[in-house]
Image: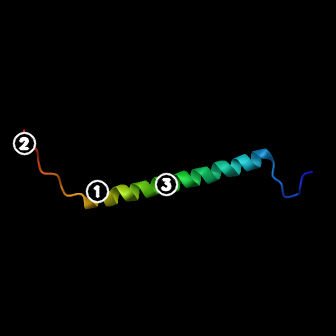
Amino acid sequence: MRHPGDDSFANRRKAADEAKQKLLEKLKNTKKQDGEKAADKQPAKPAQKA
């Protein structure tokens, strides 16, 4: 028996897709920040002799 609060499959799928996109954006931003921090911590590389 269905409850009045139940969403259709399409609505649940859409909500899951939106949540996934938000999570992917959050992780992408975190990786960018981590990459910038790692670059700041690494010493400058000396020039190579040719």
Q: Is mark 3 on a helix, strand or loop?
A: helix
As measured in the structure, the alpha-carbon distance from the residue carrying label 1 to the one carrying label 3 is: 18 Å
Q: Which of 41 and 33 is in front in this view?
A: 41
Q: Which of marks 3 and 2 is nearer the N terminus?
A: 3
**Residue lying furthest right in this view?**
1
Circles 1 and 2, Cβ within 8 Å, touching? The answer is no
Circles 1 and 3, Cβ within 8 Å, touching? The answer is no
Q: What element carries label 2?
A: loop
Left or right? Give the position of 6 relative to 15: right
Residue 4 is situated, as x and y percent measured from the top left of the image, at: 88, 57
Q: Which amino acid does label 3 sit on?
A: Leu
Q: Residue at x 69, y 52 (%)?
A: 15
Mark 1: give few (<14), some (14-19) or many (20+) Cα within 10 Å: few
Circles 3 and 2, Cβ within 8 Å, touching? The answer is no
Mark 2: give few (<14), some (14-19) or many (20+) Cα within 10 Å: few
**Residue lying furthest top in this view?**
50
Residue 14 is situated, as x and y percent measured from the top left of the image, at: 70, 48
**Residue 3 image label:** none
As measured in the structure, the alpha-carbon distance from the residue carrying label 1 to the one carrying label 2 is: 23 Å
Q: Which residue is label 3 attached to? A: 27
Q: Which residue is drawn at 35% across and 55% down?
A: 35
Residue 43 is situated, as x and y percent measured from the top left of the image, at: 20, 58
Image quadrant where residue 23 sits: bottom right
**Residue 49 image label:** 2
Q: Residue at x 53, y 51 (%)?
A: 24
Residue 38 is situated, as x and y percent measured from the top left of the image, at: 31, 58
Q: Which of marks 1 and 2 is nearer the N terminus?
A: 1
Q: What element carries label 1?
A: helix
Q: Which residue is label 1 attached to? A: 39
